[in-house]
Image (tube, rainbow, N blue to C red):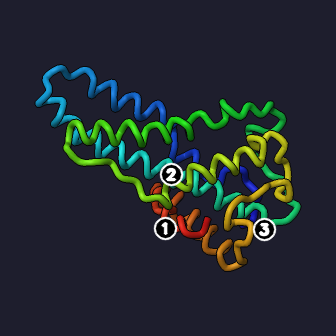
Amino acid sequence: MSKALFDPGFSKILISGFIYNIEILYYNLNKIKNFGQKKTQFILTFQKGKGLFDVYLGFYLGCMLWGACLKSMENEKIEGNPFLGGTYEKERSLEEINYMKAFVKSFDRDSKYYLGKPFKVDENKLKILDLYEEFVDANEGFSKTDTTDKIKLVGKLNNASKEDIELFNSKINEVINENKIEELLVFCDKI
């Protein structure tokens, strides 16, 4: 950890938002009128939607883990914070998180309808959404976060050990290099 970068490289993995990606999946699904074909297409939609959900959960978890890494740097200037100096609008800042929470319910309903099976999400994964919401709100959308000491951590991250921080940093670098941000989900129990 040599620099206090706001983004350690997550943005190169996530080019567009969760909402946009899911809306494209459903746009393509809804173009199909024949139920049998639509049911077959939903199998692909289900796999892609489930994968996207995990990728974005990994991103939100990664943001919190990276926040803990930055906080461990004590009083360093954070470089590249695009939200610095902006106005914090809670509803707008949490729009994607709220969409993801609604997605779980609607995707479960659609999965039962088309596939006859539920879309189940591990409770530890769902906890990421609630904690990330708390993280963004506690930090006022990072609009005033110019130094690492101003980062407010949530949950178990407040008590992360030096070994945990080193492990987080190492895994974050690994997933960024491999473009597999969803692999950060192994740290669900650390938040």
Identify which residue, 61 or 13, lies in the foreground.
61
Q: Mark 3 vs mark 2: which is more N-terminal?
A: 2
Residue 68, position as x, y percentages in the image: 71, 63
User: In this rendering, is residue 85 above or below 3?
Assistant: above
Gap in angstroms between the C-alphas marked 1 and 2: 11 Å
Q: Work out which quarter of the rendered image holds the C terminus and state it.
A: bottom right
* Dots 3, 2 in contact, CB < 8 A: no
Type of amino acid under label 2: Leu
Give the labeled residue for mark 1: 186
Q: Alpha carbon of mark 3 to alpha carbon of mark 2: how far?
A: 23 Å
Circle 3: residue type: Ser
Q: Label 2: which residue?
A: 57
| Mark 1 or mark 3, earlier in chain | 3
Q: Find residue 72 and name its label.
A: 3
Kindly state the secondary structure of the residue where label 1 is placed: helix
Q: Which mark is residue 19?
A: none
Q: Residue at x 41, y 40 (%)?
A: 105
Residue 163 is left or right of residue 15, and the answer is right
